[in-house]
Image (cartoon, rainbow, N blue to C red):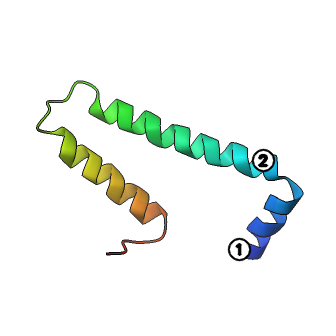
Amino acid sequence: MWSILGDIASASPWLVLFLLLILAAALVASMALCLRGTQAGERPAIIRALAELVRALRGGARR
């Protein structure tokens, strides 16, 4: 799998950058939507849940 991603990145680095920017924008937008209208006491739990989601997407929880 990594060789395929390496081939894509070497052939079109702008496409890879664009996809990474879309992923980052989606994470920021999801955080903004989750935190909108919440109480201050609920925010740390929501941020922790989003961090666990990102950790799971990266390949599992490493602690």
Disc 2 element: helix
Question: Mark 2 or 1 closer to N-term?
Answer: 1
What residue is at 57 percent from the left and 46 percent from the top?
23
Q: Is residue 1 visible?
A: no
Left or right: 26 in relation to 47? right
Q: Position of residue 47 (x, y in %)?
A: 28, 46
Q: Does any portion of residue 48 appear in the rendered image?
A: yes
Helix, strand or loop status at disc 1: helix
Classed neighbour count for the residue bearing mark 1: other residues with Cα under 10 Å, few (<14), some (14–19), many (≥20):
few
Q: The disc labelled 2 sits on which kind of residue?
A: Leu
Quarter of the N terminus within the rendering: bottom right
Q: Residue at the location (45% across, 34% down)?
A: 29
Q: Residue at x 71, y 74 (%)?
A: 2
Residue 30 lies, in percent from the top left, at: 41, 38
Residues under labels 2 and 1: Cα distance? 16 Å
Above-or-below relation of 56 to 20: below
Give the residue at mark 2: 15
In the rendered image, the quadrant that contains the C terminus is: bottom left
Question: Dot 2, how many residues are within 10 Å of its Cα: few (below 14), some (14-19), or many (20+)?
Answer: few
Q: Percent from the top left, x then y, of residue 58? A: 49, 65
Q: Answer with the quarter of the image where residue 3 lies.
A: bottom right
As drawn, the residue found furthest toward the top would be 37
Identified by mark 1, the residue type is Trp
Residue denoted by label 1:
2
Q: Nearer the viewer, residue 60 or 10?
A: 10
Q: In the drawing, does residue 42 fall left or right of residue 28?
A: left
